[in-house]
Image (cartoon, grey):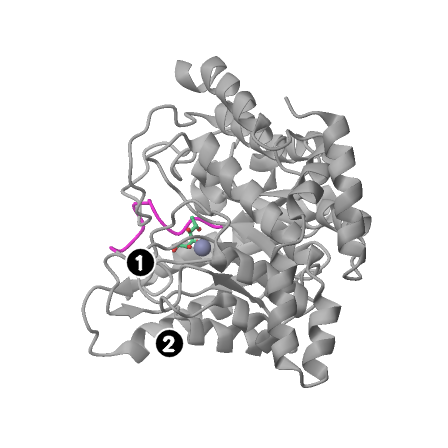
Amino acid sequence: MANDNKILNAYDLAKEAYKDFGVDTDKAIEELRSTRISLHCWQVDDIKGFEEGQAESQNVVTGNYPGAARNAEEVKQDLAYVLSLTPSGKKINLHSVYAEPKKPTSREKLDVTAFEKWIDWAKENNAGIDYNGSFFAHKMMDGTLSLTSPKKEVRDFWIEHLKTSREIAYNIGKKLNDVCVLNTWIPDGLKDNPADRSYYRELLIDSLDKGFEKNYDRKHLVDALEGKLFGIGTECFVCGSYDFYLAYALKHNLGICLDSGHYHPTEQISDKFSALKYFFNDILLHISRGVRWDSDHVVIDDDTLSSIMTEAKRADVLGKLHIGLDYFDASINRVYASAIGMRAAARAMLRAILEPTDMIKAAERKGDFSERLALSEEAKALPFNAVWDMACLKAGVPVGKDWLTSVRDYTAKYISKR
Ligand code: RNT
Ligand code: ZN
């Protein structure tokens, strides 16, 4: 077990070292505590949710490790456990298929009463809630098309789903006296080259115009649109590409969602913050890890994550972004997978907060790019881990590898019995 005295002593030394670079570690820990990371609910059950008789999903989840959460109680239990390992501020991110209506209700007819249990759960766990309509795994999908299907009855169904999802998200926000971010992602696209791309995009504009007609108080509902480059089965054409949604969202005063797996392999979402922040009130992040493609591997503390958090700090948007995770790996213990990503995101965030950014920026302003680079490198050698341990200790979450003992117990007690 971690020894509290050792942590306190190491922290005192680290505090001095950071002070030398003009950084206040106590404040940094507070900032981490108040900056929320939204844990996606779908890693613990492979995006199955609780709906009866689902059709084949448009999300590609690979692996068959045992112990997936099988019902609402198990999903809630796993998420609460993962949040208890996380020293940052917390939200969870729900999909419509995780609704718990009192009597079986078709997805497009749901209302906030189907989320009462989630709202109570969120209050108990001191977490906010974000929300998503689920435009997949349903008999009303027209192959890979929903809002852009040539069939009017298909489009109408999904427009209704978009409308009721917004209403639900708004009411969740209201009931929690918080903001609920509603992300809209649809898988719509085609495997091979369309003859008429404009046709599908015009249908999408029409569907979105109808779905987003109603205005809501932004205090409780923020809408975001998530584009992507390609999907499995939609390699040649995705209706809601990044450019499309960027333009649509800007024109209609909606937010934009940047998923780190949804761009060309060397294109970084971190570079976009300083470009978009002047024009968008709301930027939602889906932090994911694409390996060779949009594979949604478990988020780890790598260069991409580091550049996301560091640039958020440097562009002064860390507190303004809506930060969420989005990945699903069914080949390992799913609770480990959720916790690894949450802790990695929190750790990278704290490291970014602790960066001596003012000093590095001052070197740049002087035109001294050599010093800028040298300082950025020195910053990497500061005793970060001592501050991270202290942040965990203060937040009452396991320090260092202590969480492994805890997750092993949790696995033995619950997961291995599923
Ligand atoms: C899919 C998008 C989307 C989903 C979730 C389940 O490519 O990233 O965000 O992963 O809605
Ligand atoms: Zn995403």
User: Dot 2 surroundings within 10 Å: few (below 14), some, or many (20 or more)?
Assistant: few
Look at the numbered disc 2 and say if its residue's Cβ is closer than 8 Å to ligand 1. no
Part of the protein shown in magenta: 133-143
Which residue corresponds to mark 2? 202
Q: Amino acid at mark 2?
A: Glu
Position of the C terminus, as image quadrant, is top left
Measured from the top left, where is residue 18 in percent x and y? 76, 54
| Residue 204 falls in image quadrant | bottom left
- Please report whichever mark, 1 or 2, sits nearer to the chain's N-terminal start: 2
Q: Nearer the viewer, residue 362 or 368?
A: 368
For the residues marked 1 and 2, what is the alpha-carbon distance in whole angstroms? 28 Å
Q: Is residue 215 visible?
A: no
Residue 354 - label: none
Q: Is residue 227 above or below residue 195?
A: above
Q: Nearer the viewer, residue 52 or 21?
A: 21
Q: Residue at x 60, y 72 (%)?
A: 373
Residue 293 - label: 1
- Dot 2: element: helix
Q: Is residue 145 visible?
A: yes
Magenta stretch holds residue 141: yes
The majority secondary structure of the magenta stretch comes to loop
Measured from the top left, where is residue 369 in percent x and y? 62, 80
Name the side, left or right, on which 375 lies relative to 262.
right
Magenta stretch holds residue 251: no
Q: Amino acid at mark 1?
A: Trp
Q: Nearer the viewer, residue 140 or 268?
A: 268
| Residue 143 falls in image quadrant | bottom left
Look at the numbered disc 1 and say if its residue's Cβ is closer than 8 Å to ligand 1. no
- Dot 1: element: loop
User: Dot 1 surroundings within 10 Å: few (below 14), some, or many (20 or more)?
Assistant: some
Q: Is residue 214 above or below residue 327?
A: below
Q: Residue at x 65, y 60 (%)?
A: 379
